[in-house]
Amino acid sequence: MNKFEQLGLNESLLKAILDLGFENPSEVQEKAIPLLLEKDTDMVALAQTGTGKTAAFGFPLIQKIDADNRNTQALVLSPTRELCLQITNELKNYSKYEKGINVVAVYGGASITEQAREIKRGAQIIVATPGRMQDMINRGLVNIKNIDYCILDEADEMLNMGFYEDIVSILSDTPDQKSTWLFSATMPQEVARIAKQFMSEPVEITVGTKNSGSSTVSHEFYLVNARDRYEALKRLADANPDIFSVVFCRTKRDTQAIAEKLIEDGYSAAALHGDLSQAQRDGVMKSFRGRQIQMLVATDVAARGIDVDNVTHVVNYQLPDEIETYNHRSGRTGRAGKLGTSIVIVTKSELRKISSIERIIKQKFEEKTIPSGIEICEIQLLHLANKIKDTEVDHEIDNYLPAINNVLEDLSKEELIKKMVSVEFNRFIAYYKKNRDISAQSSGERRERNDSEPREFNNNGAVRYFVNIGSRDNFDWMSLKDYLKETLDLGRDDVFKVDVKEGFSFFNTDPEHTDKVMEILNNVQLEGRRINVEISKNDGGGRRDHNNRGGGRNSGGPRREGNFAPRREGSGGGFRGDRNSAPRREGSGGGFRGERNSAPREGGFRRNEGGSDRAPRRSESFGDSSRPRRPRRD
């Protein structure tokens, strides 16, 4: 007997469940569905990503909807376009045997007129992103004043993305006498505030421990020097030949750059971020779901709603600003009871964040070393041997065997195997033979640093600079760091201890970058004003008055095009043997390329994710989630 039958669902839903292949309800479904069917109540459900929350609210919602009433009866709010579309498709699948129920998706990046037209035809359930929903309410294109049900899915992520004001405004436009169901992976203070303000004595369901990570995901970190971060990513991919992963970067620019580098080096990769059009995002996700892409490089905002089975690894190429975001990232793997691995690539300056994450997710990280070239070669050789062994023979080749046998008849079995493997592998071995070990020294005791430090290295051996630009030039410490990194063409961790004052700022680099900093910055103009940089005697702890050294009001940093490597057309399979590139992974074909100029490049200030569903830049340091958010920019 299917256990869903014991939850009180009607026959049409059970028939759809059978078609979908669901056998046993997850814990959150088992707890939520009977409760929501039994009575109209407010509910807060805390459960990790990938535990089946959509079905937990979807099945009871559909059963409660009056199909004969064409008015809007339910609103589901979700953080991103991808998740909005995913929920819409799932609700349509659940209601396939319920005649007359219409579900409409409302999200940025698509025609608002067409969406309004679909709602006017009759939509009992609207699934929407907050930004687009608020836009439609303001234009009078939708009426939610009489809805019976409001569902907030991934509530913590919506609030992390800066949608607090939109959500409050939308909920204020709904009737008091309705049922509100809030689903979230974590319970920061802002989510609790929403629950207190708009819910009446909600029933709380918790699956696992509050804010904890999934028990099906193991957590690993690899300590490397900042300059070796990308090389570490490649080695981890090579050490896991069957990797099917989501690689997280913090910015759209980094996401695009890393994806392009991976494709250039022969990996099956693609970028997913807010500068892609909806059609491009759909194309990338279709290729990823079809496993034509092994490494999907994504921003946190764009990756919300990625629900793809059998993701083996989540790779944190850069750690997120917020601990809660790490929880959402790791939830991309280990779904539906399957095992997964969350990998973090860290520098010594970031070790404190690992300890912070451990405290929240209540799980320990295992420190591992980046595999050596010899270890990777051994793994890849065995993988190749198994692949040959498991290959199904296409008997179309039989007609060519006599000629092939004539060519190879003088070779022994051992010689034949060696030569066959060498065809595929010689250049791969050559690449790793001459590559150094990139693991940083073992961390031992994880270094604790002063909480007041912005994030990066301590001052040992660093050079500190004074520069005559500051907050009056529309810089905060994060945007100034990005501007300096791009202007100087340095890595993200090469500029640190950025301290922004009104008319001037300080920052640090390692000594080897001093000549470059002085030469480039002293020859750069910002909005017509010459930048002046000097080596400071300020060690980062004290203050030095430079207020008279300039600082007119300017609108922002100059834009510079990113130094991305041009794409070279790949040659199909095999490993690349040229001296300066990583070995091409066999069978990759160069990955998903898409259009060359599909993602506009950014310079100077970092902008938010595109469309009406944007995420503000957040403070670099982990901290109290209740601190004021910067306003979301439209």
Image (spheres, grey):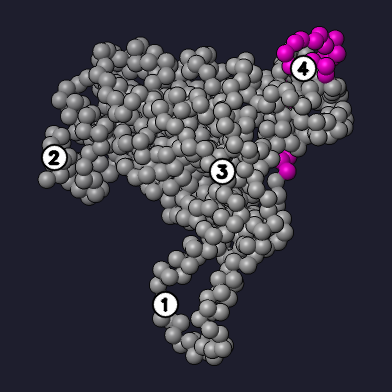
Tag 1 or tag 3, which sits nearer the N-term?
3
Tell me residue 391's x, y (percent). Answer: 42, 70
Q: Amino acid at mark 2?
A: Glu
Q: Between marks 4 and 2, how big is the CA–CA gap?
A: 68 Å
Residues at circles 4 and 2 in contact by the CB criterion of under 8 Å: no
Q: Earlier in the sequence, mark 2 or mark 1?
A: 2
The amino acid on which the numbered mark 1 sits, given as a three-letter code, is: Asp
- Amino acid type at circle 3 is Thr
Left or right: residue 454 compared with residue 81: right
Q: Which residue is mark 2?
A: 5
Q: Which mark is residue 394?
A: 1
Query: Disc 2, disc 1: CB below 8 Å?
Result: no
Which residue shows up at 76% across the image and 31% down it? 510
Location of residue 1 in the rendering, given as x and y in whole percent from the top left corner: 11, 45
The amino acid pointed to by label 4 is: Asp
Name the residue that disc number 3 marks.
369
Say which residue label 4 marks: 539
Of the numbered discs 4 and 1, the one sitting upstream in the chain is 1
**40 in relation to 336, above or below:** above
Label 2 secondary element: helix
Relative placement, left or right, of 127 versus 570 is left
The magenta stretch spans residue 164: no
Q: Which residues are magenta?
A: 536-563
Q: Earlier in the sequence, mark 3 or mark 4?
A: 3
Instruction: Please state the total of marks drawn on the protein image.
Output: 4
